[in-house]
Image: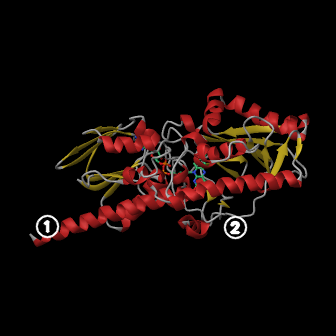
Amino acid sequence: MHDLVIVGAGAAGLGAARAALEHGLDMVLIEASHRIGGRAYSEEILPGVPFDLGCHWLHSASLNPFVEIADRLGVAYERTTNWSPALRLSGRWADDGESDDFMRYWEACDQVIEACRTDGRDGAVADIVDRDSPWVSFCDYWTALMTSSDSDRVSALDLATYLDTGENWPVTGGYGNLVARFGAGIPVTLNSAVERIERRRTGVRVHTVSGVVETRAVLVTVSTGILANDRIAFDPPLPDWKREAVAAVPLGTHNRIAIAFDGDPFAGAPSSIIDMDEEVPMLLHIKPYGHDYAVGVTGGRFAQWLERAGAGASVDHVMSRLKRIFGADVEKSARGHLVTAWGGDPWTLGAYSTCLPGRADQREVLATPIDDQLWFAGEATSPRFFATCHGAYLSGIDAVGKIAALRDETRTDEEAS
Ligand SMILES: Cc1cc2nc3c(=O)[nH]c(=O)nc-3n(C[C@H](O)[C@H](O)[C@H](O)COP(=O)(O)OP(=O)(O)OC[C@H]3O[C@@H](n4cnc5c(N)ncnc54)[C@H](O)[C@@H]3O)c2cc1C
């Protein structure tokens, strides 16, 4: 019988597996997909140019352990925090007065959200910001990018609890590549979805598509999308308090629609644009890191809707915005695209977690183990770094530290008796 089975080889599972090996635990890491990394995954948008389908930014960089890992593994990132997107309004660039007004509104939104943390109040973000402002559609859009859910489904207290140092450094070499390189060499069983976890007093049987593994403890690191949709059966079933926590911390949708171009149809363009010219605003990255592509970013219900419409419709949508800004000719140099579809990804069923209004206490409940046999980690369980790659990673290490401490206690008790 093994000491520990870890379910899922994303950032949480890989961090947990490394920690388990360091603690000398007899560990098995099981992954449903053909690859490790989960929501950390890079492909190439142009030859030799990485593109992150999932995480890309080293958030709260000075507290982020992946900075040191990137340094050690030689994966490139930029130490830059300066970000001043250009604003597109009524078919033109916003003037200074409009840009200042926009910034003031954005700061005011931040302040009312932050106030929830100081006075312990909670509510939906949509209910606490100034909805009479002409910029409210931006607040809704930005909330959907940060949380992947719409502002009426986002707890302001949860959002304010997130530990943000303001340092968001892009991994130009690909955050997905970074996590894959970190995980290389960790033993993992791929293509082996866990279907059922059966707990008995004598141990746990983990049923996968390729067989049964017996263990003393299991650490489940799959997303709350997977748990909420009962993609893993539990016997006995998860208790009501755990099911409630899963439901209280759902995933939303966040997608990136990248279009590659031949040559440079964007000469002199700003590197980031917030296009306010449609009902739903859109952040457009133009020529990221000097490469010939552009990216449109979607979040929340709009992202779900566009994802369902398909990759072709998503590209058409972003292209129509680019044409409006840069002229119809821009389309002539398009040479391919890469479009994410996290809402329908079979192994996550969403992008990242947010707490529903009034349920900001539920991440802790989600992380609480059951009978010291069934443990939980993953981004949704992180108290201050949820919805991030490093939060997931740290949650895995934290859970394994507790599992190892329990193993040591049991050994000491056995030796004493
Ligand atoms: C579009 C997008 C943009 C993002 N941007 C950023 C960013 O810039 N910076 C940042 O820090 N974070 C970002 N994130 C969030 C970050 O990617 C995630 O929080 C983090 O990668 C989650 O790691 P995890 O280990 O908790 O979960 P996952 O990565 O989902 O890992 C869980 C693993 O479990 C596997 N699994 C599922 N079901 C089973 C099963 N039945 N049996 C076995 N295995 C199973 C999955 O295949 C997966 O590999 C982004 C996410 C998305 C989707």
Q: Is residue 319 above or below residue 388?
A: above
Nearer to the camera, 91 or 273: 91
**Which picture quadrant has residue 282?**
top right
* Residue in the image at 54% along x and 41% along y: 153
Q: Residues within 10 Å of mark 2 (few under 14, many from 20)?
A: some
Residue receiving disc 2: 79
Q: Secondary structure at mark 1?
A: helix
Nearer to the camera, 112 or 373: 112
Whether the residues at callouts 1 and 2 have beta carbons within 8 Å, the answer is no
Residue receiving disc 1: 414
Q: Is residue 175 above or below residue 211?
A: below
* Residue in the image at 63% along x and 39% along y: 340
Answer whether residue 271 is visible to the viewer in this image: no
- What colouring style does the render use? secondary structure
The answer to whether the residue bearing label 2 lies less than 8 angstroms from the nearest atom of ligand 1 is no
Task: Residue 333 in the image: state x and y as whole percent.
Answer: 86, 38
Q: Is residue 4 above or below residue 200?
A: below
- In whole angstroms, how far apart are the C-alphas of marks 1 and 2? 51 Å
Nearer to the camera, 212 or 375: 375
Task: Residue 44 in the image: state x and y as whole percent.
Answer: 68, 47
